[in-house]
Image: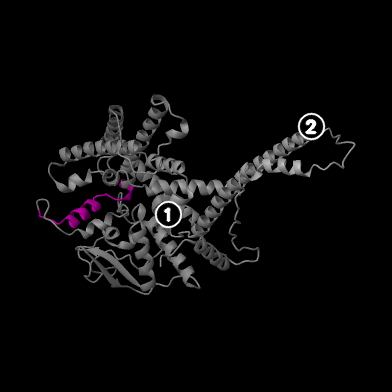
Amino acid sequence: MKNRNKHVSAMLVQKHQLDNSESKVSELDAALNMLQQSQTFNNNALDQALAELDCLLELQCIDSQLSMDVDVNNELDDLLQSIDLAKNHSKIPYLSTLDLLEFNDDMSWDKYQYSLEQYALRNDIDLDADPFNVLMSPMQRIELDKRIKDEFTIKNAQCDKYDYLIAGTCGVIGGLIDVFFVGMPGAGKLTNVADSAVDSAVEKFAGACGWEGAREGSDPTKSAISFLERNYKVNYDQATTFGTNGTDGAVGNLSPKNHHLKSLGHSPDLIGLFFSILNQFTNTSSFISNGQIITIDTDNHELKGGNFIAKVFSGFVNWLGHLFSDMAGSSGASGRGAGIPIPFYNLLLLFDVGDFGQHKQSFAKIATQVFEKGYDMRHGIAMAIPVLITELLTRLMWTCKQRFYHEKMWKECIPSASNPELRRMLLVAHGSLCLIDTGDAALKSGGDIVQFLLRTNIIGWARFGSLALKEVYAWHNTGHINAEAVDEYLESEYKKMQKQA
């Protein structure tokens, strides 16, 4: 048997009761009208009979006020027989009573459901029927279908030439910023700004953790890093293939320049958090090498905390603190140092395939060399700036066009990514940025794949890829229900209900 929605069953029964009540009220009105007509007819017939009686008495010279002894029975009988009341008024129909649903204030929900089922059996109600077809009128269904089509279906973009022109211009602006102000890791002006911002963030984090500042004449960033390294030690910080702090040959080509990339616990994302806590609990260390995940045993690492939740929190704090200690390079590094990878960048090491470059290296080795030359999270922050400018500028221009060109209300000009035209404009804008970025990298790399990747804005390509997937999905599912739009609408309605409660 189909598992029914009990609330829908109650609504179907209530709808049946409401319809029956309205129908019975209509029958009652019709019966009352017929009764009123019959009463009016009888009154008229009685008045006519009295008038004829008066005429009859007058013809017989009988004074109805003085003499009541005259025998007029025969005349009265003839008069009454001449008026056939039965043929001059309608018969009042019989009205049946409504079927009642058993209910009282002390009834449980299960008993109420049983009462609903019994009522449905007596009245032939299909509790499995589509509630939208039963509970809604034809006009309401038409309005609902129209609203769903207009507001909650995936639509294809209907951009005009100005939309494409605006989007392309915004992408070109972002691409030029990327070419002239990002460039190579550690060389572009925005990369230097990002490096300074990360150094400042490390110092502030260390200060929040108890660091009292650098000694006079020493580098404050190096001092803050040293403080964090002492206080947030982890067991998965092996930096060489062999040696005291090595992996005994388990992880090949591991060095201080790439161990933040190959060690999964050093990744600033959910993958890094998972492997960091796992390694701290199991006294292991996990790496990616040669396209495989390698796990080695380490020395015992005791997490603080009296219970499991406390130990998990301690592991999270260790992970976060250790990331800050490595974010701006190590305390003993010369120059810029090796930072931590861009989120999810280390997954590229799983693609240990292909023969690229002069030395026929796999893609994983190429990605490792790119990281070793400074392609870390600090450079990722710098690369994100032109991507963010392109995104914001496109959304701003779309909003202005909707408000001043199409003359829409401000509330209709909110730059939501669910809007198909804005989605297409963002795709064109970020595509233009990536096109300029790729052209610049190809021209300046001289055919060297490492140099090409060093100049490639991976953040921009990631954003363009996500937008491309959304556009393909929208194109393939045009006309289907947009679940995100429905969820957003229901969430807004729920918040309105909470405010009114």
Q: Residue 334 magenta-drawn?
A: no
Q: Quadrant of residue 26?
A: top right
Q: Residues within 10 Å of mark 2 (few under 14, many from 20)?
A: few
Residue at the spot 62% in from the left edge and 46% down from the top edge: 31
- Name the mark on residue 101: none
What is the magenta range? 359-379
- Residue 248 lies, in percent from the top left, at 23, 72
Q: Are marks 1 and 2 in contact (CB under 8 Å)?
A: no
Foreground pick, 193 / 22: 22
Q: Residue 366 magenta-drawn?
A: yes
Where does the N terminus fall, quadrant-wise? bottom left
Label 1, on which residue?
A: 130
- Residue 128 lies, in percent from the top left, at 43, 60
For the question of whether residue 328 can be seen, the reply is yes
Nearer mark to the viewer, of 1 and 2: 2
- In this picture, residue 365 sits left or right of residue 127: left
- Residue 348 lies, in percent from the top left, at 23, 56
- Residue 156 lies, in percent from the top left, at 30, 39
Question: What type of secondary structure mainly makes up the magenta span?
Answer: helix
Residue at the spot 82% in from the left edge and 43% down from the top edge: 71
Three-letter code for the amino acid on which mark 1 is drawn: Asp
Q: Earlier in the sequence, mark 1 or mark 2?
A: 2
Label 2, on which residue?
A: 59
Foreground pick, 151 / 488: 151
Q: Quadrant of residue 162?
A: top left
Tell me the SS state at disc 1.
loop
Three-letter code for the amino acid on which mark 2 is drawn: Leu
Foreground pick, 60 / 308: 60
For the question of whether residue 200 can be seen, the reply is no
Tell me the SS state at disc 2.
helix
Q: Residues within 10 Å of mark 1 (few under 14, many from 20)?
A: few
Residue at the spot 35% in from the left edge and 69% down from the top edge: 279
